[in-house]
Amino acid sequence: MKFIYALINMLAEMAPYLLLGFLVAGVLYAFVPGRFYRNHLSRPGAWAVIKAALIGVPLPLCSCGVLPTAVSLRRNGASRGAATSFLIATPQTGVDSIAATYSLLGPAFAVIRPVAALLTAFAGGMLVNREDKTLGACAADAEVDTIDAPASDTFGGKIRDALRYGFVEMIQNIGKWLIIGLVIAAAITVFVPDGFFTFFARYPLLSMIAVVIVAVPMYVCSTGSIPIALSLMLKGLSPGAAFVLLMAGPAANFASIIIVGKSLGKKAAGVYLGTIVAGAIAIGLCIDYLMPRSWFTMPLVEGESHCHLHVGLFAAICSAVLLILLVNAFIQKYLPKKTEEMENNQTVIVVKGMTCGHCKAMVEKNLSKLPGVESVSVDLASGKTSIQGHPDAAAVREVIDDLGFSIEK
């Protein structure tokens, strides 16, 4: 029962803040036009790098969702530095994860996390710009629209878009990773002996290197990493090492590095990974050696009671709402849908590499723009993409490649 209690307690602590974060994410999506991001990042120089980081921090995109968006920015004139800055800042944090960080880890982590994302993104973008002798040049002539633009023009329509994106599509994107993070955190809290990481706590740099080795090949979203970081701190890991997990886990994984190298070049991919790792360790060391430990003890004191059930009425209501939204999102995402197939007017392909609702929306949106296409329907679970009409096969493949995905042969 202790495992169940720990799981429920962590969910209850995060639920109110997650719901608030999802709502803000939906408002940003519905009321801020996609061209705003492109117009402000399609400029050379340091100012574009700064704006890319500032725009990327609140955006609720995971590392897989941010990749086609950054590729689009690059193809539409953004400098490699600005695209790299956007890539580094966006997956590390977002309005949803900032709220959730505050709920479990306290105000110090909630403030330091977006500040660290800004600093590392600016450093990485400027390093890439320094190596780029053709600032502002487009990488290709093709234009791929990967920043969502809601179809509704009325206020009421935008409200519906905001609610659907925040409470359906966003939850589809990160729901699985949130649940995985909570389960891992509860398991660590219950089954790992207290003080298990005390040895590593005496050697912060060693513990941070170990965290990087584990975090880079592992994929965990910025929200899902929060309960894992808390549970590791409860078992003796230093706050600085836990912070390394919060930064490196969401932003640095093999899939992202490969696509960054393909889109922006090998040097940019090296800077991307190096900046994230070096920045995470540097700020982690500052946390352990230069900042008051009292800033980071609040979650440790509160976490001692995670093995005993204590949930208030408001938290219980928010948890129930969040669970209902999770179930609804998973049903819509994974439940097989009936499709009407017309034998002579439909092309069916399997697109590999899609991992979230954002990926699905981008494939549908961009394929729909091709001449001869009447409609597009994507089943995310299987990758099956049904294209109604008579599109050019080469054009379809080009769009899929430009988005960073591939077609199964």
Image (cartoon, rainbow, N blue to C red):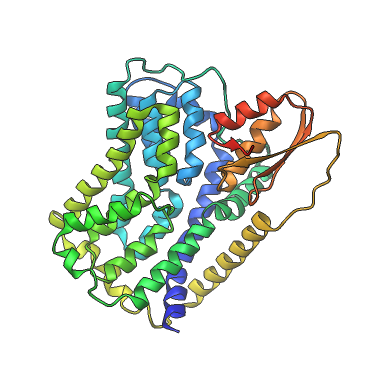
What x and y, as percent, mark residue 273?
Answer: 32, 39
Side of 142 relative to 203 (left or right): right
Q: Is residue 16 visible?
A: no
For this rendering, which residue is in front, 311 or 148?
Answer: 148
Q: Quadrant of the N terminus?
A: bottom left
For this rendering, which residue is in front, 338 or 95?
Answer: 338
- Residue at x-position 56% and y-position 36%: 405
What x and y, as percent, mark residue 397?
Answer: 63, 29
Side of 31 relative to 386 (left or right): left
What x and y, as percent, mark residue 71?
Answer: 48, 30
Q: Is residue 226 above or below residue 368?
A: below
Tally the marks.
0
- Residue at x-position 36% and y-position 78%: 190
Q: To which quarter of the image does residue 54 belong?
A: top left
Q: Is residue 374 visible?
A: yes
Q: Is residue 47 above or below residue 218?
A: above
For this rendering, which residue is in front, 174 or 338?
Answer: 338
Side of 306 relative to 406 (left or right): left
- Residue at x-position 36% and y-position 60%: 102
Q: To which quarter of the image does residue 352 belong?
A: top right
What x and y, as percent, mark residue 332?
Answer: 68, 56
Q: Quadrant of the C terminus?
A: top right
Q: Is residue 360 above or below residue 292?
A: above
